Amino acid sequence: MDARKIRALFVASVLLLVGVSDGTQSEAKTKGKLDASALSMDVVGGYFIVVRASIGDRHDLSFLLDTGATISAIDRKLAERLGLATRASLMVNFDKTLRVQWCILPELAYGPERATNIKVAVEDLRYLRASGAEVDGVIGWDLLRRHSFRLDFANRRIVFGATAISATGAHSVPFRESSLFLTVPIDLDGRQVWMIADTGMRGTMFYEPQLEATSYVREASISGSSVGGNVESQIALVPRIRIAAQDLNRQVYVVRAPNSPLLDGVAGYLGIASLNAKQVTFDLDRGVLSWQ
């Protein structure tokens, strides 16, 4: 694995992403005509989903769509240009407690979706450039959980609402959903664990205590970056990992568990790109994740 994804957990129920990839960007364009419920998307580095958004009269902004980010965020420079007042909050970043900024965004529109008076984190998002994603903000789970949606990788579009669940996938699993995140059941060497379904990462990341009952081989140590600085992690090989009837890549990332009760019962993060699917549907009405 050449990509790295380390997460940070905010006390105020905030998750922000950090990733490093090979920097490649898909040049495929949206196929066919978009209807009123659809939004065009670009895929950067093989897994980052980037869409166009607008804030008031500022159009053509680029936002990362990330189901693994609990709260949406905007770049610090954009907040300054918009003249938004910021406030401080605490963040738990693995073994560190940090102070971060947030603000109230008056409006955000992307495709058919529109939200007003949104509490968003304010961060320096320049680190995403190493992944080839130069974005103005992040659309997180706080906004995405409002409606069902389908990620159509084959046609480079996102479909929202009832239209999104009209197509059924070849594979499906039930999920658990809250205001913080969405988790799916994973079979880890015959043991069921629950992992956050994350469109913002490439592979699979486990918190180290979740692997204590599993015989795994450590292959390498790597250093990743988070909003709180460097975070040490490892690459490991597990005996078997499956979702539904589909085997996943046995090579995974392993990081130290954050000291926060908000992630109790969560084994780590499953990158949606690991499914190698043409379409992935988040059916929030039935509580089912399906893909084909």
Image (tube, rainbow, N blue to C red):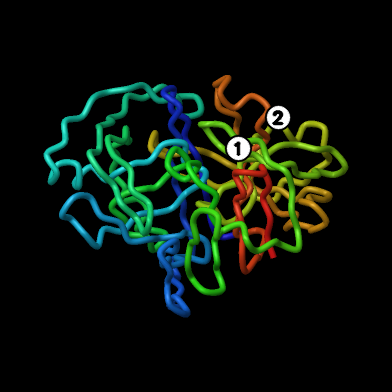
Q: CA distance from mark 2 to mark 1?
A: 9 Å
Which quadrant, please, contains the C terminus? Answer: bottom right
Q: Position of residue 241 (x, y in %)?
A: 78, 50
104 vs 21, left or right, is left
141 vs 274, left or right, is left
Q: Residue at x 75, y 44 (%)?
A: 186
Vertical relation: 248 (above or below) 95? below
Q: Residue at x 50, y 61 (%)?
A: 159
Residue 212: image quadrant is: top right
Q: Residues within 10 Å of mark 1 (few under 14, many from 20)?
A: some
Give the SS element for disc 2. helix
Q: Which amino acid type corresponds to the residue marked 1 in the rendered image?
A: Val
Q: Are marks 2 and 1 in contact (CB under 8 Å)?
A: no
Q: Which residue is mark 2?
A: 209
Task: Looking at the image, tell me whether mark 2 or mark 1 is earlier in sequence order.
Answer: 2
Q: Position of residue 92 (x, y in %)?
A: 45, 25
Q: Residue at x 55, y 55 (%)?
A: 162
Question: For residue 255, which numbered disc appears in the image?
Answer: 1
Question: For residue 105, which numbered disc appears in the image?
Answer: none
Q: Which amino acid type corresponds to the residue marked 2 in the rendered image?
A: Pro
Q: Residue at x 62, y 49 (%)?
A: 283
Q: How many marks?
A: 2
Identify the residue at the far right of this view.
Answer: 190
